[in-house]
Amino acid sequence: MGTGLTLTSTWGNNRFTYGLEAYFDRVNSSRTIANDLTGSRLDPNGPRYVDGSTLNQYGLFLQDETNWDERFTSFLGLRYSLVDVNIPFSSVRPNSSGFSRNFQALTGGLGARYRLTPEVNLVFNLGQGFRAPNINDLGEAGSRRVTDINLPNPSLAPERVFSVDGGLKVSGTAFTGELLGFWSQYTDRLDSVSLGTVINSDGSTAQLFQTQNLNSDTIWGIEFGGRYRFSPQWSSFVTGTFSYAESGLSGENAIPPFNSVVGVRYEPTTGVYLEPFLRYAAAQTRLSANDATDLRINPLGTPGWGTLNLRAGLPLNPTTTLRLNVDNIFNATYREHGTTLDGAGTSVTLGVDSAF
């Protein structure tokens, strides 16, 4: 549950955006063991998360957008964040639960936009980030993934990041698009770390994991996207993202490989469209130590894949549109890197959008 208030005002060449927000989360958790012969009973080891745990988040923010002239605009922002986490005592885990933590931070950001031409903008941003440990980070206990076990860690510190991004944005009559690069430096990054193995009562082996603050991690990459209109009826579009982690590979990164979407769109009349497109991901063979032991990920890496898909729309009246999606037309077998299940096979979705 959450609420927020955002206000704007102007003063000269300045436009201010400011406000506050609050979010309240509570865990209601239990775990039962089902047996066809003896029926169901509560798990004596308790649920993964202590019942009654709460996470409350509060924020105050202010941004100043200043138009210095018709070409140059700057952005300056500040945010104060406060996070309260409470994990009540549990008789099942008396040594690992029953604590409260409070985290707070003041972060800022600076951005600029310079209009090179009426259609081309140069953009640049500097920013700080702050993520407090949540209930999952601090208090998760017991089985995780398939055969692994997680240990709580009530001593975690917040994760912080400093990031830089910039590039070009184009908004023309025939072509719209962007080319952006980003670089992020994480400190005290929250990540799951293997602590070794343990032998279960049935003789099987389980990996022990715990969320910890790692030293640092650097991730950089490139994003691009664009749409070119050949004629009033035909256009093509493409998007792509490449990310690379330079350090901190002992953690559970699951950095995605290069992935892209390429397609064309045909619009014979207003509101009617037919859009075939290809989703593509390259192979990801660069795994962290934890990724290599994750049963969801092939130890040799995740193979590349591609799916052909189709979107279409037909207006039934000025306020109602019939939409059709056909995904994975050739029923390709694939898996998004780091996910639990293979992607869906051929599927057809028919929907109706109506505006009132």
Image (tube, rainbow, N blue to C red):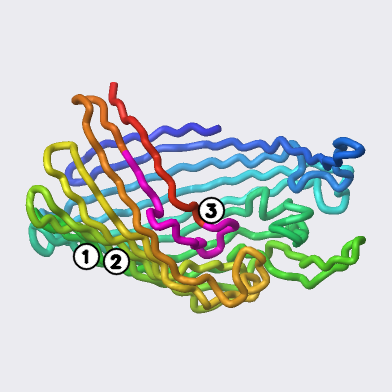
Inter-mark Cα distance, 1 to 2? 6 Å
Amino acid type at circle 3 is Ala
The magenta-colored residue range is: 324-342
Inter-mark Cα distance, 3 to 1? 31 Å
Image quarter where the N terminus lies is top right
Image quarter where the C terminus lies is top left
Per the rendering, the mark at residue 105 is 3
Image spot of residue 272 (x, y percent):
18, 39
Residue 61 found in image quarter: top left
**Residue 233 shows in this picture:** yes
Question: How many badges with numbers are in the image?
Answer: 3
Image position of 249 with respect to 44: above or below: below
Q: Is residue 356 left or right of residue 195?
A: left
Q: Residues within 10 Å of mark 1 (few under 14, many from 20)?
A: some
Residue, disc 2: 180
Per the rendering, the mark at residue 168 is 1
Image spot of residue 108 (x, y percent):
41, 56
**Residue 248 shows in this picture:** no
Q: Residues within 10 Å of mark 3 (few under 14, many from 20)?
A: some
Is residue 137 one of those drawn in magenta? no
* Secondary structure beneath label 2: strand
The overriding secondary structure of the stretch rendered in magenta is loop
Work out whether mark 2 precedes mark 3 in sequence or the reverse, and give the earlier one: 3
